[in-house]
């Protein structure tokens, strides 16, 4: 009986579709029916196109090329699968290339645990199955191919055209469906994000889109939408900006300020604040009462961006966009921390949900006795280096893991290290892990800290114990003497004690603090699982570090002259080793609610504290805020010369629009939350009057801010601005 031949195009298409399905079902819990249609069409296109090209080659070349292609494809899927298992997000090309060497060297143990377990081994076998089948069936597959390539067979050349035409038809059909649906079109074009593209169109097409974006990012013009000018200037009666002013109130009582949303109304509650912060100096003015508002300036440099735009050049479009923005206003807190010391801490995998008044009394104190962020989000886009980038530069890391490397190539101008250095501060940066990880030895030496950067490998290894993860308490004990007597000082820490893996066998900090957490759980009658208890135990080392820091500052008599700011780098992705949105049991256990969306996953806590703030009621910020808002808020508080139009975040104490947006273009304001992937808007108050076209206009703002973040990197925009104006006149005036 004659063996039935297997068409090469069919085999390749099925192989692509199979690997896409395995990947999708393994990393994604919440599916859309349309995504499976796109997987089918793009897989068919890939199979037909590759098969058509292969028909040009001799059989001998085919026998080498096909297994190489299948092996490479399997490797790509395996790497992305392991990345998703570890970090809970899909990594774009930039991030993979930037972190690959570091991950292999720094987290080899974590990677081995991911690979050498049932989940890892079984998925590797699944992804390699098409390659195994090729060797089993290759005789029946290549039997049909011409010995010397299709061009040597005059009657068979139409096969090539048929394959290519079929591939083009599949691709065209997919594009037709994408551009017929506004939601799919946005993900594919102006609201592109790698993770959203992967989940909607498949890993293969997501990588193609990412490579296309990388290729065009350095040359293509970044187009800004024009609606933000009207919105910010409030020229339209029904604009969201008008409604935001009337739908937002500041309750000031006894020195306590609560920023919150209320139902949109025709009149507005007016707030008057004096420069002082005592209970007697702040009051709420009733509607209709005559108010003489305090005269505040704007957070803007004396750079004429309109003139820069008119002069032309590669940054003209960006200059034109910036010129349309209205700078945020200064306020009663502008310069409140001028001349004070600053200790800025990016806390590894920290979550506000672990704060407890008894278990973590110092973190509780810092988070409730200063500026309280009650609706704070840490967008998780590119792991730790992405979180650092957001905190240090107030921008979204649109180049993934290479964002800090790109922005520091020509020096930095807008981060707090450089701005305070220009005011004569002594500065240092520290990290209690390998100092070269993520190329920090190249990037963190350019953050403007005059005393340089120290990590394990260039000095810190002689001061702290060789544990993994290292102790944040030891880090603080050994480094505090280096700067405490050199006031004013400006210090940055990237901690590591809270790093995964979270169990009591492999995590040194979890073992160190196990008894304390177990006793607390027993006292509170809490039945946390081991990963959650181990996570909390690891973070107790940060609590001990902060207790030591605050105690030392108080003993030194400089607690009132020192500001401590703490923000996480990302959510605790190490809690769930094989999870995805909708299937994060340990994270949900820690948070106390099911984690099904990016907003729920990335919710956390930030804190800004100074000893002087404990003299009055805390400043409570109930409006949405995120990591990109920390730098603008610090700039305002420290009274440095800065331009609020050059950041995508906001000073949370200003009149700027409270807006949090995520890498997939979801966003949240004080009026509600919008899901870009579902195209749905959920109001904060069901009875609120939402302005007409509100969602479209806020979405336009988000797209513009993402475009601006891209432009800063692709066009080295900050250098352009500083080259166009005198640094001493515009940004470094005392």
Image (cartoon, rainbow, N blue to C red):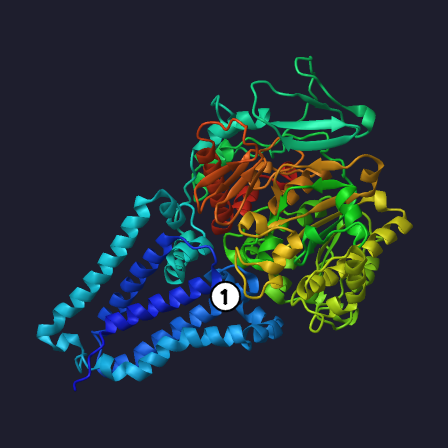
Q: Can I make out residue 142 in this image?
A: yes
Q: Is 161 left or right of 623, judged from the image as shown? A: left
From the viewer's perspective, tell me whether residue 527 is left or right of residue 413: right
> Who's the residue at 46% across and 35% down the image?
695
For the image shown, how many numbered marks are present on the structure?
Answer: 1
Please, is residue 524 above or below residue 647 in the view? below
Q: Mark 1 falls on what kind of element?
A: helix
Q: Nearer the viewer, residue 440 or 345?
A: 345
Residue 319 screen position, x and y as percent: 48, 38
For disc 1, the marked residue is 97
Task: Identify the image quadrant of residue 25.
Answer: bottom left
Quarter containing the N terminus:
bottom left
Quarter holding residue 590: bottom right
The image position of residue 732, as x and y in percent, is 67, 40
Quarter placement of the C terminus: top right
Residue 570 in sight: no
> Is residue 451 found left or right of 717 in the rendered image?
right
Q: Taking 505 as reference, is 472 above or below it? A: above
Question: How far across and how far down the image is residue 22, in percent?
Answer: 41, 67
In this orientation, which residue lies closer to the viewer: 551 or 318? 551
Kindly give the residue lying farthest to the left in the view shown. 155
Q: Position of residue 38 (x, y in %)?
A: 33, 56
Around disc 1, counting alpha carbons within 10 Å, would you say few (fewer than 14), some (14 to 19), or many (20 or more)? some
Outermost residue, bottom side: 1
Viewer-nearest residue: 84 or 385: 84
In this view, 160 is above or below 540: below
Seen at 63% across and 30% down, the residue is 329
């Amino acid at each position: 009986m004659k063996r039935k031949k297997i068409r090469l195009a069919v085999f390749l298409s099925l192989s692509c579709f199979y690997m896409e399905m395995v990947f999708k079902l393994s990393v994604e819990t919440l599916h859309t029916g349309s995504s499976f249609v796109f997987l089918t069409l793009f897989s068919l296109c890939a199979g037909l196109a590759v098969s058509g090209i292969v028909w040009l080659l001799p059989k001998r070349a085919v026998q080498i090329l096909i297994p190489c292609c299948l092996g490479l494809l399997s490797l790509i899927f395996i790497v992305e699968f392991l990345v998703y298992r570890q970090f809970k997000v899909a990594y774009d090309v930039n991030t993979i290339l930037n972190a690959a060497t570091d991950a292999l060297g720094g987290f080899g143990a974590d990677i081995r645990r991911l690979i050498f377990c049932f989940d890892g081994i079984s998925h590797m076998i699944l992804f390699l199955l098409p390659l195994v089948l090729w060797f089993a069936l290759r005789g029946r597959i290549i039997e049909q191919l011409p010995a010397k390539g299709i061009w040597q067979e005059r009657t068979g050349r139409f096969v090539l055209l048929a394959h290519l035409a079929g591939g083009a038809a599949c691709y065209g059909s997919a594009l037709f469906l994408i551009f017929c649906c506004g939601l799919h079109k946005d993900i594919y074009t102006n609201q592109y994000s790698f993770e959203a593209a992967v989940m909607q169109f498949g890993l293969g097409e997501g990588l193609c889109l990412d490579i296309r974006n990388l290729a065009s990012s350095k040359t293509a013009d970044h187009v800004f939408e024009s609606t933000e000018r009207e919105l910010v200037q409030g020229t339209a009666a029904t604009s969201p900006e008008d409604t935001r002013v009337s739908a937002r109130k500041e309750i000031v009582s006894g020195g306590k300020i609560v920023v919150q949303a209320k139902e949109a109304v025709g009149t507005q509650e007016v707030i008057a604040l004096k420069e002082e912060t005592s209970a007697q100096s702040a009051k709420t003015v009733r509607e209709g009462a005559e108010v003489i508002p305090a005269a505040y300036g704007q957070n803007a440099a004396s750079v004429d961006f309109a003139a820069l735009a008119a002069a032309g050049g590669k940054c003209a479009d960006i200059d034109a966009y910036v010129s349309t923005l209205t700078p945020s206003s200064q306020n009663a807190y502008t310069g409140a921390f001028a001349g004070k010391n600053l200790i800025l801490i990016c806390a590894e995998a920290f979550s506000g949900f672990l704060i407890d008044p008894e278990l973590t009394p110092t973190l509780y104190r810092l988070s409730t006795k200063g500026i309280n962020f009650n609706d704070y989000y840490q967008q998780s886009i590119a792991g730790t280096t992405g979180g650092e980038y957001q905190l240090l530069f107030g921008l979204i890391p649109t180049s993934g893991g290479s964002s800090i490397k790109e922005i520091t190539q020509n020096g930095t101008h807008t981060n707090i290290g450089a701005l305070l250095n220009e005011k004569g501060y002594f500065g240092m940066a520290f990290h209690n892990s390998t100092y070269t990880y993520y190329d920090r030895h190249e990037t963190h030496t350019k953050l403007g800290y005059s005393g340089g950067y120290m990590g394990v490998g260039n000095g810190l290894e002689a001061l702290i114990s060789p544990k993994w993860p290292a102790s944040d308490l030891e880090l603080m004990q050994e480094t505090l003497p280096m700067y405490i007597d050199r006031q004013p000082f400006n210090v940055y820490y990237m901690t590591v004690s809270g790093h995964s893996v979270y169990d009591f066998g492999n995590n040194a900090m979890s073992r160190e603090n196990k008894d304390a957490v177990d006793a607390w759980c027993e006292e509170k009658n809490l039945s946390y699982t081991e990963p959650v208890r181990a996570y909390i135990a690891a973070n107790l080392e940060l609590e001990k570090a902060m207790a030591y820091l605050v105690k030392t500052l108080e003993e030194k008599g400089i607690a009132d002259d020192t500001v401590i700011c703490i923000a996480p780098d990302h959510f605790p992705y190490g809690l769930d080793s094989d999870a995805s949105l909708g299937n994060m049991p340990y994270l949900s256990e820690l948070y106390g609610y099911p984690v099904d969306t990016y907003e729920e996953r990335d919710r956390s806590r930030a804190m800004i504290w100074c000893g002087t703030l404990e003299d009055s009621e805390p400043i409570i910020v109930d409006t949405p805020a995120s990591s990109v808002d920390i730098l603008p808020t610090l700039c305002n508080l420290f009274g440095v010369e800065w331009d609020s139009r050059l950041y995508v975040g906001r000073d949370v104490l200003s009149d700027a629009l409270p807006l949090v947006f995520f890498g997939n273009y979801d966003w949240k304001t004080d009026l509600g939350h919008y899901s870009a992937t579902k195209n749905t808007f959920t109001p904060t108050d069901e009875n609120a009057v939402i302005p007409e076209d509100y969602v479209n206009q806020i979405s336009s703002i988000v797209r513009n801010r993402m475009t601006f973040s891209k432009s800063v990197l692709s066009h080295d925009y900050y250098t352009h601005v500083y080259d166009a104006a005198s640094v001493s006149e515009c940004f470094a005036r005392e």
